[in-house]
Amino acid sequence: MSLLSDLVAAVGNGSIEVVDLTAPLSTQTPILTLPDPFWQTWPFELVEISRYDERGPAWYWNNIKTGEHTGTHFDAPIHWVTGGDTAEDVSQVPPGKLVAPAAVLDFTAEADKDPDFLLEVDHIKAWEAQHGPLPPGGWLLYRTGWDARSADQDAFINGGRTPGISVECAKWIALESPILGVGVETVGTDAGGAYAFDPPFPCHSFLLGSNKYGLTQLQNLRRLPATGAVVLAAPLPIVRGSGSPCRVLALVQR
Ligand code: MN
């Protein structure tokens, strides 16, 4: 038996479960909205080409309209000015980095009490004291319970009050931790109030500026163990793309 045939057998008999961390894509998928004068991303939309009709008698197909940063998506380093124009675009992310271990940090209770809750370095240190060090080259998946709101744009955006990561913590993750990137359940990796931080949007600023990545609008993190899950993140290889809608799956040993 090879490692891969063992893996396939384990997926087949359920001893490894494949958990889908991806939000369904539709016109209802919540999107980020920016204040004036900034331009907006598009919601997801299907534009029908034909549906077993005169436009194409035997086939149904659509064009799609979407922002790169719509729904569950991947942020590439070129997305932020700190990465800049020469940083990796989403087509240049090495495929070997798209299969990676995950640490899942659950702050649902804190975010429940305070929608502006911010993850701090001490929270991560306390998690490490209990679960061991963050996995080198892995994802830090930050659970806040926000996926429960993901069917409703207003509840999801919550008037701009959504949990995130403090400036110091974002800097620490980017510069000192061995983490590949941060995954969140919210509309972006930064807190709803992060436009007013110094620097603004510290998670984007420090992580993408350090050739690290972001994953957003994840679901079902509650079904993952604190350690031991393996994440498969599959953004489209959009040439010069700053990000991409992304299918994100987790392998979990049962
Ligand atoms: Mn994004």
Image (cartoon, grey):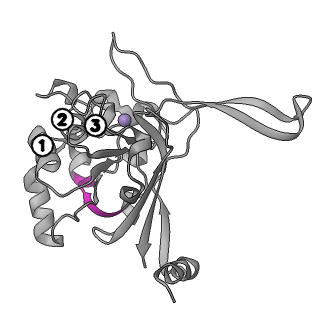
> In percent of the image, x 68 and y 31: which residue is there?
63
In magenta segment, residue 106? yes
191 to 223, vertically: above or below: above
- Measure the alpha-carbon separation of dots 3 and 2: 15 Å
Q: Which residue is mark 3?
A: 162
**What residue span does the magenta drawing correspond to?**
100-109
Q: Amino acid at mark 1?
A: Lys
Q: Secondary structure at mark 2?
A: helix
Q: Is mark 3 within 8 Å of ligand 1?
A: no
Q: Majority secondary structure of the magenta segment? A: strand
Q: Position of residue 176 (x, y in %)?
A: 10, 52
Q: Quadrant of the C terminus?
A: bottom left
In this view of the protein, which residue sits in the foreground, 84 or 13? 84
Q: Amino acid at mark 3?
A: Thr
Q: Which residue is mark 1?
A: 171
Residue 174 seen in render: yes
Q: Which residue is mark 2?
A: 202
Q: Residues within 10 Å of mark 2 (few under 14, many from 20)?
A: many
176 to 242, vertically: above or below: below
72 vs 9, left or right, is left
- Counting labels gives 3
Q: Secondary structure at mark 1?
A: helix
The numbered disc on residue 231 is none
Q: Position of residue 218 (x, y in %)?
A: 41, 49
Q: Residues within 10 Å of mark 1 (few under 14, many from 20)?
A: some
Q: Amino acid at mark 2?
A: Pro
- Measure the alpha-carbon separation of dots 2 and 1: 7 Å
Dot 3 or dot 2, earlier in sequence: 3
Q: Which corner quadrant of the image does residue 98 belong to?
A: bottom left
> In percent of the image, x 49 and y 37: which residue is there?
238
